[in-house]
Image (cartoon, rainbow, N blue to C red):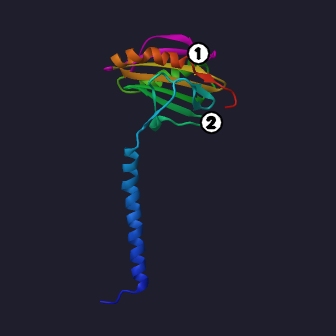
Amino acid sequence: MGTVTRRQLTNVLAALSIVLILAGLAFGLPALNRALPADRSIAADRPFRIGAGVSVRPPPGAVLDVTGTRPGATDATALFRIGPVQYAISVRPYDGTLTSAAARLRQRITDTSGYQVTGAQLAVATASGLAGLQGGYAAPGRGGRYAVFLAEGRTIEVTVSGADLDLGNTLPAIEASTRTLRYERGR
């Protein structure tokens, strides 16, 4: 058996150090991520900038879920929670009509297993003058609402989902929030 040189000992120690650092990253970062809350408090009395020039006043009592929120200059998403109800707003580039944007959103909803669009689709407008279409959808034990608006080559898609009772209790506040959607050119 040969002797261990100083260089070999240094290499072994360096390799062990790298393994310990990688283990710390592999186990420590996920643990830290789980320890941090996903929900952030937000003010309902002022507009929240979603991104891509779109803002909204969140409903009272809503929290921002940072795991589903992605600000951006051309694509942006904000996910709010009001108790167990999810309120999502997505902004994406789009060059079609309002009718085709609504059909595209309805198709994505019905592509989810067990979900179906219910009732008639109705015209809706925001306080800032954005014209849109809205409707409802359902799945076993869950209900939902959707709305889609167009603003200068962008769709603003709103989806709301929750258990029927929870949804019924929060829907008036969410509808009031949706009416505050605003698009500002150049933002």
Residue denoted by label 1: 126
Residue 73: mark in rendering: 2
| Alpha carbon distance from label 1 to label 2 | 22 Å
User: Which residue is situated farthest in the right direction here?
Assistant: 186
| Residue 90 x %, y % | 53, 29
Q: Is residue 124 left or right of residue 136?
A: right
Q: Is residue 136 magenta?
A: yes
Q: Dot 2: within a 10 Å radius of its alpha carbon, few (fewer than 14), some, or many (20 or more) residues?
A: some
Instruction: Tell me what residue is drawn at x 55 percent, y 11 percent.
Output: 123
Q: Element under label 1?
A: loop
Q: Is residue 79 left or right of residue 75?
A: left
**Magenta residue span:** 115-141
Image location (x, y in percent) of residue 96: 62, 23
Q: Which amino acid type is shown beneath numbered disc 2?
A: Ala
**Judging from the image, what secondary structure is the residue with disc 2 in?**
loop
Frontmost residue, 113 versus 142: 142
Which part of the image, by quadrant, shows the C terminus?
top right
Q: Above or below — where is 116 with respect to 77?
A: above
Residue under the image location 46 percent in, 17 percent down: 173
Q: Is residue 176 above or below residue 24?
A: above
